[in-house]
Amino acid sequence: MNIGLLQCDHVAERFQHSAGDYPAMFGALFQRHAPEITLTPFAVCADEWPAALNECAAYITTGSRFSVYDDVPWIHRLKAFVRQIHEAGKPYVGICFGHQMLAEALGGRVAKAPSGWGVGVHACEITQAESPEIWMQPPQRQCWLQYMHQDQVLELPAHAVVLGRSAHCPVAMFRAAPHMLGIQAHPEFTADYSRALLHDRRARIGDERAQQALDSLGQPTDEAVIMQWIAVFLRQATVRGA
């Protein structure tokens, strides 16, 4: 399956020795956990777009240092593109900024999190654990994942369903439609890359919170489970939309 990776930022060159840019991070993740999926990157932050919506079977949107409510031309265009994906019934998964973009594009609201920065490894409680959605295989009551965000979804689009929540983030995972999924966490991040970002942003995050996040990086994470879920979600949504 060929998935379009809508790249909304670049990893700073000084950090690329850790895990590369976003296409390398996501490519390595899929190669480990869902090798049947190939990625075609589009640097939408540099105004590089698919020639047509059907160029790819589905789309994944990356994180970004930007906010989805920034008045930037490519962000406005991405909102419109996400609406087109929704209307066409094409599968979509948004990660961090992409998760927030899904909410914003379909009528939800994103803003700075009242709780401040969400950083480090946190547990995401799966709200559907008693009756998981069919693509949530293997079932899991919680997933430990890496976070790095200031903004978060404060209001969901109409008919959206919360699938996961963290103590600092009530909407940590949601489904906006049968074919559209948002995940606030960063399954693609390595501990080394998170560590570098935390040191770089320590003054902005605050010393105490940054140190707690750094201390949390020894916690094992569940990106393997999340990637299995994403792969099954994309396959099933593609079949459903065919």
Image (cartoon, rainbow, N blue to C red):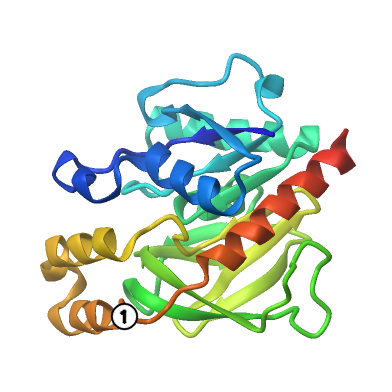
Residue at 68%, 60% (x, y): give it: 229
Q: Vertical placement of 217 versus 159: above or below?
A: below
Q: Is residue 133 left or right of residue 83?
A: right
Residue at image position (68%, 23%) is: 53
Would you say 33 lies left or right of 162 here? left
Residue 139 % position (x, y): 73, 76
- Name the residue rendered at 18%, 81% in the picture: 211
Q: Secondary structure at mark 1?
A: loop
Q: Nearer the viewer, residue 239 or 82?
A: 239
Residue 77 seen in render: yes
Between 168 and 104, the residue placed more toward the observer is 168
Depth check, front residue: 7 or 79: 7
Among the 4 quarters of the image, the one containing residue 20: top left
Q: Check the image and report above or below for 111 versus 22.
A: below
Residue that badge 1 annotates: 218
At label 1, the amino acid type is Gly
The quadrant in which the N terminus is found is top right
Q: Between 80 and 219, which is closer to the camera in this rendering?
A: 219
Q: Position of residue 173 (x, y in %)?
A: 61, 67
The quarter of the image holding the C terminus is: top right
Residue found at the very far top of the displayed protein = 51
Q: Is residue 97 above or below residue 241?
A: below
**What count of labels does the image hold?**
1
